[in-house]
Amino acid sequence: MRIGFDGSRSFASWRTGTENYSYYLLKNLAKIDIENDYFVYLRPSTKIRSEEWPKNFTFKAINFLYLWTQVGLGIETFKDNLDLLFIPAHTLPIVRNPRLKTVLTVHDLGSEYLPGYHQLKQILYLKFITKIQLKTAIKIIAVSNATKKDLVEKVGIKEEKIKVIYEGVDREVFKAVKGKMLVNSLRQYNLVSKNFFLFVGTIQPRKNLERLIKAFSDVILRARAPFSEEGSQVRKNSLIDSSPSVQNDSIKLVLVGDKGWKSDEIYELPKKLGIEGKVKFLGRVEDRDLPALYSGALGLVYPSLFEGFGLPILEAFSCGCPVLTSNISSLPEVAGEAAILVDPYNIDAIRDGMIKLTDNNFRDKLTKKGYLQLNKFSWQIAAKETLKLFKEVNSGAS
């Protein structure tokens, strides 16, 4: 079988959800499939050492700066006599070899649920282009049952056309960092172990960072309460009394991720709340440094308003980091019973969950549950199930 693989995202210099999915799936397909020929299509600026990949993997740069998918990739489907084309996101070339079988992955339909948190061009593209392409694909991979449900209800895709294949996590990269290595790794960011909460993801509105920062501000207010005139009133009935490790205001909120759309208000909020010294925006952080941040954090705080999967949750579990996340979309499916689930629209709920994460015994229990939950997710399994689907589609059995 001659398989085309859209690798335009696989080797991005900064990988987030879709890029990680594309890279790790390709990497693990290369480990298990020596029978089929893969044609991996890349952006012209991509740098890759093709000699490090199996001989049945051919890498081809498509020299189109614009309309890379719709024109450049479309042309290649005729030139390379492909049997199947796989797109690890949701955009198929409209003009393509008519005999070509197609499989694509849908990560989420966030713009359907949160149109105010997406750019207009994204919303229009989904409504008028992507929906048509989803219906022309032979098979669709959904990264969660939540996404499958959305495809059925929002787009009208038949259930039998959708295959749920979970993402995984690279456990060789994401593992607990301890001792001097942890201390030294955190020092470069001016951080101390177990003295900060961590968020990982693009800095943008749908990640719910304004509510997270406000919840954190309330945690700081309660930590300062014994020294304020209204201290006793603020502390009354508060969870903070059972969390001695937060009874100082040196604790920080660390946000890792690239600046996204409509993010200016997020960056300005800590100053407005009087906690600018407590909130650190680290920007991009290399994968090699992320495990130390996860390992040193009190917990990953990830109260997103919508996710198709939520890969940082698995990365945190793999590093022994407890998790607080939202009780909506795919996040409960990924986190299971191994995380604190909160209403992401309720600032008090986020705050109380963060305070729980300061309790050492509670954190230890969550960490153990996280390791168990992690066993449900594997890139090796994802690659095997994806390859099986390719074979079914090619044989006409799907």
Image (spheres, rainbow, N blue to C red):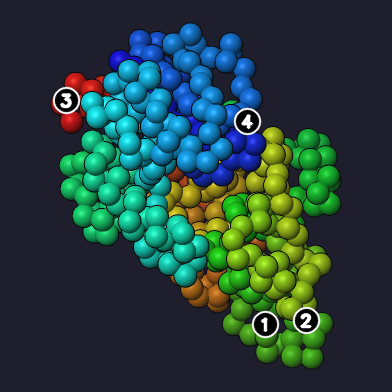
Residue at x-position 55% and y-position 54%: 323
Spatial CA distance of label 2 from label 1 is 8 Å
- Which numbered disc, 2 or 3, marks the residue that appears first in the sequence? 2
Q: Secondary structure at mark 1?
A: helix
Q: In the image, which disc is placed on residue 246?
A: none
Whether residue 360 is situated above or below residue 376 in the rendered picture: below
Taking the image as shown, residue 193 lies to the left or right of residue 90, namely right
Q: Which residue is mark 2?
A: 226
Pointers 2 and 3 in contact (CB under 8 A)? Answer: no
Q: Residue at 21% across / 55% down in the picture?
A: 156
| Mark 4 burial class by Cα count in 10 Å: few <14, some 14-19, many 20+ | few
Q: Residues within 10 Å of mark 2 (few under 14, many from 20)?
A: some
> Position of 125 compared to 393: left or right?
right
Tag 1: Cα neighbours inside 10 Å, few (<14), some, or many (≥20)? some
Amino acid at pointer 3: Gly
Name the spot of residue 3 as percent of width and height, x first: 36, 21
Q: CA distance from mark 1 to mark 3?
A: 65 Å
| CA distance for labels 1 and 4 | 56 Å
Residue 97: x, y in percent?
29, 28
Whether tag 2 and tag 1 are in contact, CB under 8 A, the answer is yes
Above or below 51: residue 120: below
Q: Where is mark 4, residue-wise?
A: 45
241 displayed left or right of 102: right
Q: CA distance from mark 2 to mark 3?
A: 69 Å
Query: If you read the primary sequence from the N terminus, does the residue marked by circle 1 or circle 4 appear first?
Result: 4
Instruction: Give the Cα distance between marks 3 and 4.
Output: 36 Å
Q: Which residue is mark 3?
A: 396
Dot 2 amino acid type: Pro
- Mark 4 residue element: loop
Three-letter code, disc 4 = Ser
- Judging from the image, what secondary structure is the residue with disc 3 in? loop
Of labels 3 and 4, the one closer to you = 4
